[in-house]
Amino acid sequence: MRVNPEFRRNLWLELSPQRLIGMPMVLGALFLLAFTLSGKRFGEDVAKMALFLFGVLAIVWGTKLAGESVVTEIRDRTWDGQRMSVIGPWAMTWGKLFGSTVFPWYGALLCLIVYAVSAPFKPGTDIFKTVLVMAGAGLAGQAVALLASLLAIRRDRRFSRSQASVFSVLGLMTAFTMLSLGFQGRGHIQWYGNSFLPIDFTLLLLALLLAWAVIGIYRLMRLELQMKNPPWIWLGFVIFLMAYTAGFSLPAAQGISAGALSRCLLSAYVTAVALTYLTALAEPKDPIRFRRLIRAGKDGDWRLLLQGCPSWAMVLPLLCVVAIMLFAFPPTDISSSDSNFRMAVAASLFFILRDLALLVFFNLSRNPKRADMLAMLWLGLLWLVIPLTLSGLGFVYLTQLFQPRPEAQPFVSLVAAPCELLLAARLVARRWKANFG
Amino acid sequence: MIEVNQLVFDYPGTRALDNVSFTIAPRSVTALVGPNGAGKTTLLRSLAALDEPVSGQIRIDGIDVLAEPRACHRRVGYLSDFFGLYDELTVRQCLTHAACANGIAERELEQAVGRSAERLGIGDRLSDKAGALSRGLRQRLAIAQAIVHEPKVLLLDEPASGLDPEARHSLAGLFLELRDMGMTLLVSSHILAELEEYSTDMIILRDGCIVSHESIRPVQAARVAFRLGLTAPLAELAEILSGIEVVEDVKVDGASATFTFVCDPDAQHLLLKELLHRGLPLRAFGEDRQTMQQSYLSSVRNNEEREGKS
């Protein structure tokens, strides 16, 4: 059997004989301390210590190592050698994910074993599920940290150690969110009309999160290895996330009514909007990429065009489809009329396009280092500061120039939004011509 | 072996490579020279399929690099100017990882590692940690990693920086050995004298454009340049030389002169005899071989003159 070279390299680096001996000795000493402090009882206190140490090792340390694994290679100038190798994207994905964290996992698995044998039986506590949630949360945190680092290096390849800690924080947030959801202890979670115990729902969520995170890492690894990605997987993820969030709009088993369907659609629409903005901010928007796309378009190379198309642009057609479905099934439980709601949704589409145009405009400047920050500042002004000021001055109807509101006169928004989009598009065209034309 | 056609590479606000086209023959060693910022590293990284150009075509060993970058990676070895090593691994582990990552079968790993280490003279350092090596030894290890899988094309960005003169000389020998094994090498360097030892061709890159692409070692030239020196300037020197049959392109500069003559050794012997017979106070006579430095400067000057005229 052929050994994964990246995994083997990590084994050489991480699992020295001293470390292999040292880890159980340190853990053993700490468990002995817990055993002694609990009146020499091998029970709850030792189990708590095991879970705490698992958290420190797999979640805190593991996410740190996973988040830094590629960034450190770039900083140490070894990453180009890896990219030039024949290691495939899948081998690199699991080689990095499990290889960089192999030492913390060595200790963390010892902790889980100690927990499993020391945790006293209590009604409502399922040791096996607890172990699964803990391990899943650790893995999910590490996967998210690695995914975030791979996303970040698409924009800028130089990260200091302190900057790279942001990836660990994202991983930690993911892991602890999963743990708090899984161990919230009371109530049930309603999803698509089904009632789940928190720990069961967390296990399902962890499986889905892990699957998508690993797919995401694999796709970003492909890009690092100069391979192209077809857009379908990304679209699949967007549809999955829309369907996942829509599930919470159907809390009880009510069957499919028009009202329930519109609630689901609205939830899906909000999710797609959030994903559009998130990816628009996260992805690079450099003119070189746009130039390649223009060239592919001119050459009629649709495959290259789809492969190079920004993720946020891929979400837009889905957004339009959901918006059209919302036109057909407007919510029944809002105060505005159906036509007002439809106008507000249509206007929101134009406002989104305007915002994307502004993001591109700022990124096409000659010095685009803080372009996204500047764009966010402008979007904050357009969406919040100006409408609030106008509202404060008593010109409430004018706020619709910047915000679509179905309960007021969304016709104003529907006229204003395309005008603003045209203005933003003109700005983009002028800047492109001036700087890159 | 390497075909580049109309390659364009942009950085935001800067064109790094502007319609670069050239062809490199198999089993050649091409020196890639040019001032800082000329686009040498960008070109090498594009050839290594590490960075994607805006447009153009690159073919290496028949592979379309932009369409099949991974297939290109199998055929190419690349050493970056600012390379990195896994400092905590031993030399043996570094080379084993490089060999394994480049597709060498498990049963052949040890042999490949040993061969590569011996070629670079680090066979006795296999148990040392990479982080404990000197600058020169680190450079050798990095080159050993780049050639461990014996690629068809080897791209080297400033491979001799940090090496002492002895190591540089042995590096030249290694490059010639690799070429004789069938590899095609493209070497970027600032040290032209060092490139002269092993290069067969030279590409001069300036402001992202190719200024010149010429062969440094013409196989068989019909005429050769000569230089002679006198003990003192002689007014009629140009007239005397121009008067001799087959002597052409005479240029006199004080007490020395350059001209071209046929390659025939017997004819050259007769020419020297004739010059002495005419009583010229000769103190030096020999072939005027243009060094790479002179060739580079002359190409750059010619290019500047052309640009000035246009």
Image: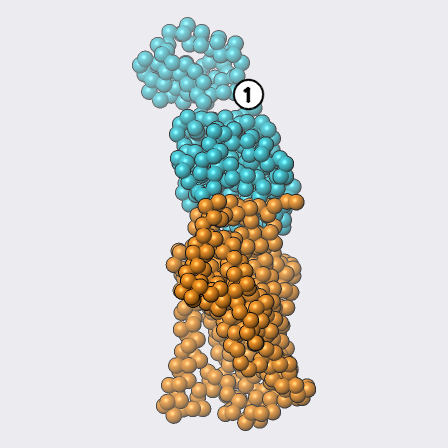
Chain colours: A orange, B cyan
Taking the spot 44% from the left edge, 10% from the top edge, the residue there is: B272
Q: Using the image, name the chain to which the residue with label 1 belongs.
A: B
Mark 1 highlights which residue? B222
Taking the spot 51% from the left edge, 45% from the top edge, the residue there is: A12
| Left or right relative to B123: residue A248 | right
Residue B164 spot, x, y in % from top left: 39, 29
The residue nearer to you, when weighing B199 against A267, is A267
Q: Neighbour class for label 1 at 10 Å: few (<14), some, many (≥20)? A: few
> In the figure, A85 relative to A259: above or below?
above
Taking the spot 49% from the left edge, 64% from the top edge, the residue there is: A42
Q: Secondary structure at mark 1?
A: loop
Residue A3 spot, x, y in % from top left: 61, 45
The residue nearer to you, when weighing B310 against B291, is B291
Residue at the extreme left: B232
Quadrant of the rendered structure where residue B296 is? Answer: top left
Residue at the extreme right: A255
The residue nearer to you, when weighing A9 against B77, is A9
Residue A154 spot, x, y in % from top left: 50, 58
Taking the spot 58% from the left edge, 92% from the top edge, the residue there is: A333
